[in-house]
Amino acid sequence: SQELEQSPQSLIVQEGKNLTINCTSSKTLYGLYWYKQKYGEGLIFLMMLQKGGEEKSHEKITAKLDEKKQQSSLHITASQPSHAGIYLCGADEGSARQLTFGSGTQLTVLP
Amino acid sequence: DAGITQSPRHKVTETGTPVTLRCHQTENHRYMYWYRQDPGHGLRLIHYSYGVKDTDKGEVSDGYSVSRSKTEDFLLTLESATSSQTSVYFCAISAAGATTELEAFFGQGTRLTVV
């Protein structure tokens, strides 16, 4: 099975600052997913990327998948306290439909 | 919100006792997954199912078994609970299809404590 590495493991930013979270795979990805989790709650789907070079945005969050489909980044513009939580990238190899996840990035946004 | 319900939401059990967690969906999705979440490890796949009576192991399947006798229910059983199985367990569901977005919907989680 593939391994997904996320960086950084934790991030503390001042409100209004931009930030980037990275997710790297050892294998070519069929699909790359970004989820957000608030403490003690389930995961909320943010975006899914499937094509090399693809970029999607939702409100102030933009996710990109590189051309080789092995690395993705999640960028938050002008962060707000509501963005705080754990961000997880997940990947699907396509063949077995196993969804595996990175270890997560804990984001804290200071008001 | 996707129709996915986990039960119980919280459970405390003693070492050596069997425990069953239930995941119930109303979406008729083909795929169902059980994950555990621990600090520093993110979400780790325990078992998953790709249809009724079709299941396979994930990366941390030791000590766990699953069953899926109906599309809507996916049960996770700890045959003899150990303290290392104290964790938060999440169920997820997703639709099948090679060309569709494999968005997975997650339950709210079950916090299991083994004492």
Image (tube, coloured by chain):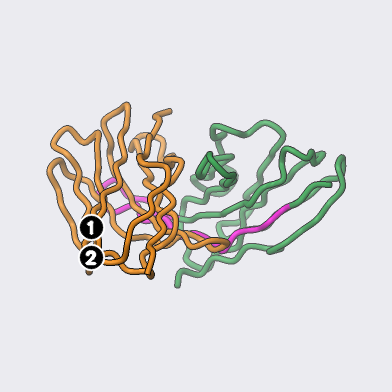
Chain colours: A orange, B green
- Residue marked by disc 2: A78
Q: Check the residue under mark 2 and report the chain it is in.
A: A
Circle 2 SS class: loop
Report the disc number at residue A18: 1
Tags 1 and 2 both on a single chain: yes
Q: Residue at x 23, y 65 (%)?
A: A78
SS majority, magenta? loop
**How busy is the neighbourhood of tag 1: few (under 14 within 10 Å), some, or many (20 plus)?**
some
Real-space CA distance between mark 1 and mark 2, rounded to the nearest whole angstrom: 5 Å
Q: Are marks 1 and 2 in contact (CB under 8 Å)?
A: yes
Residue B93 x %, y %: 48, 56
Q: Is residue A108 above or below residue A102?
A: below
- Residue A84 as seen in the image, left or right of residue B68: left
Q: Check the residue under mark 1 and report the chain it is in.
A: A
- Residue A3 as seen in the image, left or right of residue B49: left
Q: Is residue A5 above or below residue B110?
A: above
Is residue A74 located in the magenta-colored stretch of the structure? no
Exactly how many numbered labels are in the figure?
A: 2
- Residue B12 as seen in the image, left or right of residue B111: right
Q: Is residue A12 above or below residue A60?
A: above
Which image quarter holds the N terminus of chain A? top left
Circle 1 SS class: loop
Sooner in the amino-acid sequence: mark 1 or mark 2: 1
Residue A24 x %, y %: 30, 35
Q: Residue at x 60, y 63 (%)?
A: B24
Three-letter amino acid code at disc 2?
Ala
Residue A94 x %, y %: 33, 38
Q: Which residues are magenta?
A: B94-112
Q: Residue at x 69, y 39 (%)?
A: B65
Report the disc number at residue B64: none
Residue B55 x %, y %: 56, 40
User: To which quarter of the image does residue B62 belong?
Assistant: top right
